[in-house]
Image (cartoon, grey):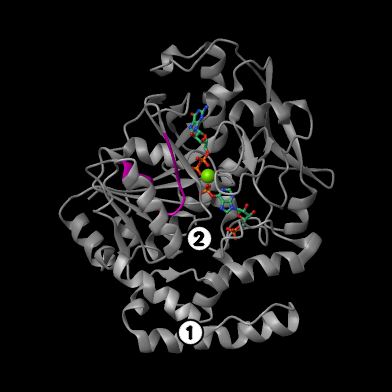
């Protein structure tokens, strides 16, 4: 019953989509367990490029069943357009399963996300504006709408009424916006019911039965460890748990079933939106990482903030997720630097600190302490084994492994499915 969790070890965009897709051919189920269409996963298969937001990246593997778990927030209009976009390109999406307990992102959640950010002004989080935070807030406040509610008009109407009761007061009196009409929302949501019906399933039962039958299940995280609502750089985080524990609550599979937890780790660091980022570069090196790495958001088109590798963060990700392996991505992007600085510890108020401080104030004051590792200039995109890498690239990988606290079991040397060096098998 192999159950693998694959998640982001930094601030998202580590290459999770590519890593999931790579394993997709050998797994039976790929499950999204949190987040929603704030995710942007680019997968390159041959000469085809796919941008996925809500669907698990396993959707591109014909033998794999893609599952949207109970912990995900689903925008039905986005889901349906993502499905039809894939169908037009010849991808079969008929095996998709969606939990009836997943919460629905409605147009009022998107509105609230946008007005709240505007209201925050300088203190804004820089959200993706997709309604993620307000939908999770309603879930926790027990005024959320779930996928199963689409199939009972009376319950749906009562729930939309309850949700809009306070929101309309807030929108009209505080934010100076027009009130949202309950009937209009109910009508729109009911319009999705029939289209989604073939996919809605008891995914908890399906996944647990699959594991009992020795099927291979892969849990694909959205976002990353440092964007986790509990373990990330709060409040500059997303509103869910991308960390390993989220795979259990977001799917209904118990922790005793998880056999491996793989952290996807970029060979440098990026971040989108506001919040602290100790190794961020504002110079030519940062611009070069952005240019060579193509660091522009798949979801919002924003430039990603770029910086050197941060081993303090990698160690933290190993700890809070109980990582068994790392998948190091985008090593090819570092080709051409004579020296590559790596942050090995922080200096906080004159003291050397080896581990991520729990205090927000301390983290905001953290200055990176760098060690320079020798770079390489040879093209590594054709490397098929570790031995094919130039000596300095091998040493860079070994140094990162040593500092990060878990074995690096695969290395990405390009965006394509086959541009990967496998060191230890994941299955
Ligand atoms: P995700 O959100 O974690 O799935 O990552 P994104 O798809 O947002 O961003 C990662 C980007 O890097 C995508 O454009 C991938 O195609 C690309 N990518 C993934 N792995 C590699 C790699 O090893 N090398 C290079 N050059 N690009 C990669
Ligand atoms: P993938 O899955 C990078 C960031 C946003 C913002 C914060 C909160 O592609 O790695 P939200 O809309 O979630 O309330 O925004 O989280 N963020 C991401 N950054 N990659 C992502 O997803 C992200 N999803 C959300 O930029 O700072
Ligand atoms: Mg992304």
Q: Is residue 289 above or below residue 377?
A: below
Q: Label 2, secondary structure: give it.
A: loop
**Label 1 CB, ligand 2: below 8 Å?**
no
Q: Label 1, secondary structure: give it.
A: helix
- How many residues crowd around disc 2 within 10 Å: few (fewer than 14), some, or many (20 or more)? many
Where residue 144 appears, as percent x and y from the top left, is: 48, 78
Where residue 124 appears, as percent x and y from the top left, is: 73, 61
Residue found at x 61% / y 69%? 111
| Residue 50 part of the magenta segment | yes
Where residue 364 appears, as percent x and y from the top left, is: 77, 52
Q: Please give the range of residues in magenta.
A: 49-60
Sequence-first disc among 2 and 1: 1
Horizontal side of 1 relative to 58 (left or right) equals: left
Horizontal side of 391 relative to 292 (left or right) equals: left
Q: Nearer the viewer, residue 224 or 290?
A: 290
Residue found at x 72% / y 38%? 279
Q: Is residue 214 above or below residue 374?
A: below
Rendered-image quadrant of the C terminus: top left
View extreme (right): residue: 350
Q: Is residue 366 visible?
A: yes
Q: Nearer the viewer, residue 350 or 34?
A: 34
Q: Are marks 2 and 1 in contact (CB under 8 Å)?
A: no
Where residue 410 appears, as percent x and y from the top left, is: 41, 30
Q: Which residue position holds label 2?
A: 241
Return the mark for residue 183. Answer: 1
Q: Whole-Å distance between the Cαs marked 2 and 1?
A: 33 Å
Return the mark for residue 394. Answer: none
């Amino acid at each position: 019953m192999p159950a693998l969790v694959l998640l982001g070890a930094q601030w998202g965009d580590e290459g999770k989509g590519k890593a999931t897709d790579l394993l997709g051919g050998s797994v039976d189920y790929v499950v999204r367990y949190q987040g929603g269409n704030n995710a942007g996963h680019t997968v390159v298969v041959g000469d085809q490029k796919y941008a996925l937001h809500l669907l698990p990246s396993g959707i591109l593997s014909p033998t794999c069943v893609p599952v949207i778990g109970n912990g995900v927030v689903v925008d039905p209009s986005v889901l349906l357009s993502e499905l039809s976009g894939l169908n037009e390109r010849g991808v079969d999406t008929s095996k998709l399963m969606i939990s009836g307990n997943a919460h629905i992102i409605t147009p009022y959640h998107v509105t609230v996300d946008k007005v709240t950010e505007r209201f925050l002004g300088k203190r804004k989080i820089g959200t993706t504006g997709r309604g993620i935070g307000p939908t999770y807030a309603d879930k926790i406040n027990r005024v959320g709408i779930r996928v199963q509610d689409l199939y009972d008009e009376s319950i749906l109407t009562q729930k939309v009424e309850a949700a809009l009761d306070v929101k309309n007061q807030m929108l009209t009196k505080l934010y100076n916006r027009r009130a949202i009409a309950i009937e209009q929302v109910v009508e729109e949501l009911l319009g999705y019911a029939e289209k989604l019906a073939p996919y809605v399933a008891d995914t908890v039962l399906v996944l647990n039965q699959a594991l009992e039958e020795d099927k291979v299940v892969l849990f694909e995280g959205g976002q990353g460890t440092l964007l986790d609502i509990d373990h990330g750089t709060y409040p500059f985080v997303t509103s869910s748990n991308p960390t390993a524990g989220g795979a259990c609550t977001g799917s209904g599979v118990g922790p005793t079933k998880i056999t491996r937890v793989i952290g996807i780790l970029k060979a440098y660091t990026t971040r989108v939106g506001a919040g602290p980022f100790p190794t961020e570069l504002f110079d030519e090196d940062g611009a070069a990482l952005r240019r060579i790495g193509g660091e522009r958001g798949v979801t919002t088109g924003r430039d990603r903030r770029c910086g050197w590798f941060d081993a303090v963060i990698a160690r933290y990700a190993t700890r809070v997720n109980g990582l068994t392996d790392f998948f190091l991505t985008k090593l090819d992007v570092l080709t051409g630097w004579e020296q590559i600085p790596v942050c090995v510890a922080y200096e906080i108020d004159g003291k050397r600190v080896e581990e991520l401080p729990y205090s927000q104030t301390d983290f905001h004051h953290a200055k990176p302490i760098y060690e320079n590792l020798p770079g390489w200039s040879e093209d590594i995109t054709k490397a098929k084994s570790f031995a094919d890498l130039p000596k300095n690239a091998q040493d860079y990988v070994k140094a990162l492994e040593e500092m990060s606290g878990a074995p690096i079991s695969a290395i990405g040397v390009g965006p394509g499915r086959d541009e990967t060096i496998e060191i230890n098998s994941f299955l």
